[in-house]
Amino acid sequence: MTEVDRSAAYYSLIQYCPDRGRAEVANVGALLFTPLDQVVRVRTISSMKRVRRVFGVSIDGQRVKRALRAFADAIESDADRRRFKTLDDLRRFIATRANEFVLTQPRGARSEHAADTLDRIFEEYVSDGAVAAASGMAYPRRQLEAVAARLLNDGRTVKLDYAVAIPNTDRKVHADIVYLNGTTNLVRCLPEIDVPAHADFAAQRAGSEAQMLRRSNARPFQREPKLIVVSGGLPNSDANLVEQRIEDILRYFEGAELVRANALEAFADRMAREAK
């Protein structure tokens, strides 16, 4: 008999997204699903500070707070009725979300104690003290994943945490998000980089992987691949200089492109528009 992994769990972030077209989001809660006992736990923010920080002080915080509570109550009510028996059940639920609250695609987590795990995820990604709140790799990745979730809901081909094998080697090219148009676009989000040597390394690695894919004739999803590197936001006054170094290096390689931090919103719009 196969032993059941009693610590397996999956989490999803609850995001407030009042305008799907702009793809701006604020993390307002977290959800943890443990398949073994078919239990869903939800924790949401108690203050609207983050929502106002992202969308402006004119936002009706009390209305958003009431709507968020109703959304969380609906999830917990569905869980009480055992609607969520498998991970696929949760994914189907996420795909049906059409209001101002969306859920990110589930990610695996180890959970010896579910309540502690949910608190840790909440503190890391949602609370006012979360390092990932305003910048760094987590912000562009979360924003693009929100777009990817809507594309999946529309029936378009999008993959998360995907790896493409380079033919005749043991190497793989990893991407945070993959979307298709005439090309297979492998989107990789970088962390904050403020040291030129680190920028050089990240660019050379991405460029060499993109070129290896092209020259090996790899055709994931029957299309020519392209590696799109998304800047994670740069914290100091040399941001433009560091991003320029990355861009200059990538020009030497086939099939690689940089999206600068200040072009993230435009790229999110482009992804939503182009994806097939």
Image (cartoon, rainbow, N blue to C red):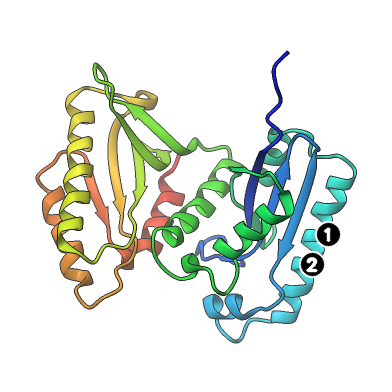
For the question of whether residue 98 can be seen, the reply is: no
| In the image, residue 84 above or below residue 261 | above
Rendered location of residue 44, percent (x, y): 71, 65
| In the image, residue 253 above or below residue 17 | above
Rendered location of residue 105, percent (x, y): 59, 45
Residue placed farthest to the bottom in the image? Answer: 57
| In the image, residue 246 above or below residue 169 | below
Left or right: 130 in relation to 266: right
- The answer to whether the residue labelled 1 contacts the one labelled 2, judged by CB atoms less than 8 Å apart, is yes
Q: Inspect the image, locate mark 2, and give the three-letter code of the amino acid beneath it.
A: Arg
The residue indicated by pointer 2 is 69
Q: Inspect the image, locate mark 1, and give the three-letter code of the amino acid beneath it.
A: Asp
Q: What's the distance in space between the residues labelled 1 and 2, CA to CA?
A: 6 Å
**Which secondary structure lies at badge 1?**
helix
Residue placed farthest to the front in the image? Answer: 112
Left or right: 274 in relation to 44: left
Q: Quadrant of residue 217?
A: top left
Residue placed farthest to the right in the image? Answer: 81
Q: Quadrant of residue 62?
A: bottom right
The residue indicated by pointer 1 is 73
Rendered location of residue 68, percent (x, y): 74, 67
Say which mark, if any, is on residue 253.
none
